[in-house]
């Protein structure tokens, strides 16, 4: 995430990047880290609590790529629909393949019984994880757009900037980005390029090497405008 953290740091922001449990290169992967996405905004609020004990935070912005894009939006009030989460878990709604963790859903089913005893835990997915300290959000190729509720999208009041790849097949525009862009009243955004793929934001040698630097600079400019 240096392409995003670097420009923010150079613009004078205090920048923190999170390793979410079960979804990072340090500790390895667990299926919950990819599928229990509603736990991620709680991680951010926890880190903000820790940082606030060290020194005053000032205005807070959250930027995120892919699942991080959902995480950022959840901190502004966006909620997932527990009914859709249950449908995904049971296979009623197909889950697109996760490149970093193929077979994540099968791995989750091996750990937990897929019966009504699981439903109360999944109901917490629809809780409000907004954090009043968050004043602006920047999403890059955001995920989970197909699982969030339109009602919650319409409640977002902080500025939201969005960028996406026109050739993204992991988080396609129509499924994952468009709900945020169309239904968050404060959202604005544009494509990072018609040929830009999801992978171009994280591969060591992406096909479009300049895209990350450009989007990172746009994120910094967005936060300079809205967190000044």
Image (tube, rainbow, N blue to C red):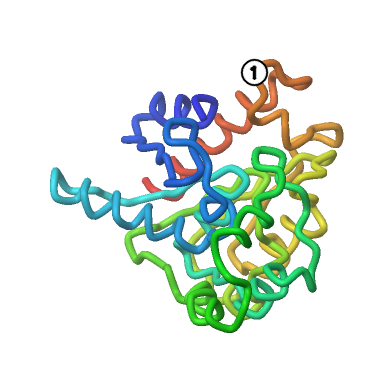
Q: Nearer the viewer, residue 139 or 43?
A: 43
Give the residue drawn at x 46%, y 56%.
Answer: 40
In the rendering, at what x and y percent does residue 191 appear?
A: 76, 42
Query: Which residue reaches farthest top?
Result: 205
Structural crowding at the residue carrying mark 1, measured as other residues with C-alpha within 10 Å and reported as few (<14), some (14–19) or many (≥20): few
In the rendering, at what x and y percent does residue 53 appear?
A: 14, 50
| 178 left or right, relative to 10 | right
Asked if 81 appears above or below 216 in the picture, the reply is below
| 206 left or right, relative to 139 | right
Residue identifier under label 1: 204
Say which quarter of the image contains residue 49. Answer: bottom left
Give the residue drawn at x 42%, y 46%.
Answer: 21
Query: Dot 1 lies on which element?
Result: loop
In the rendering, at what x and y percent does residue 127 appear?
A: 46, 76
Q: Nearer the viewer, residue 36 or 16?
A: 36
Give the residue drawn at x 72%, y 65%.
Answer: 146
Count of marks placed on residues:
1
Give the residue drawn at x 72%, y 74%.
Answer: 87
Q: Nearer the viewer, residue 206 or 89?
A: 89
In the rendering, at what x and y percent does residue 164 appear?
A: 72, 43
Asked if 222 appears above or below 120 in the picture, the reply is above
| 39 left or right, relative to 97 | left
């Amino acid at each position: 995430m240096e392409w995003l953290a670097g420009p923010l740091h150079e613009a004078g922001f205090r920048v923190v990047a999170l390793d979410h449990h079960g979804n990072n290169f340090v500790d390895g992967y667990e299926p919950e880290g990819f599928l229990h996405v509603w736990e991620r905004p709680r991680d951010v609020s926890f880190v903000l609590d820790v940082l606030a004990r060290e020194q005053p935070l000032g205005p807070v912005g959250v930027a995120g790529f892919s699942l991080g894009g959902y995480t950022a939006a959840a901190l502004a009030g966006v909620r997932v629909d527990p009914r859709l989460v249950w449908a995904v878990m049971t296979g009623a709604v197909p889950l697109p393949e996760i490149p970093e963790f193929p077979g994540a859903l099968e791995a989750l089913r091996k750990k937990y019984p897929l019966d009504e005893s699981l439903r109360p835990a999944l109901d917490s997915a629809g809780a409000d994880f907004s954090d009043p300290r968050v004043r602006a959000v920047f999403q890059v190729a955001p995920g989970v757009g197909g699982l969030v509720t339109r009602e919650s999208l319409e409640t977002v009041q902080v500025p939201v900037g969005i960028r996406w790849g026109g050739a993204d097949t992991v988080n396609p525009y129509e499924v994952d980005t468009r709900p945020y862009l169309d239904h968050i009243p404060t959202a604005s955004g544009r494509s990072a390029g018609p040929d830009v793929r999801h992978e171009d934001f994280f591969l060591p040698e992406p096909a479009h090497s300049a895209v990350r630097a450009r989007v990172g600079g746009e994120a910094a400019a967005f936060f300079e405008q809205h967190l000044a």
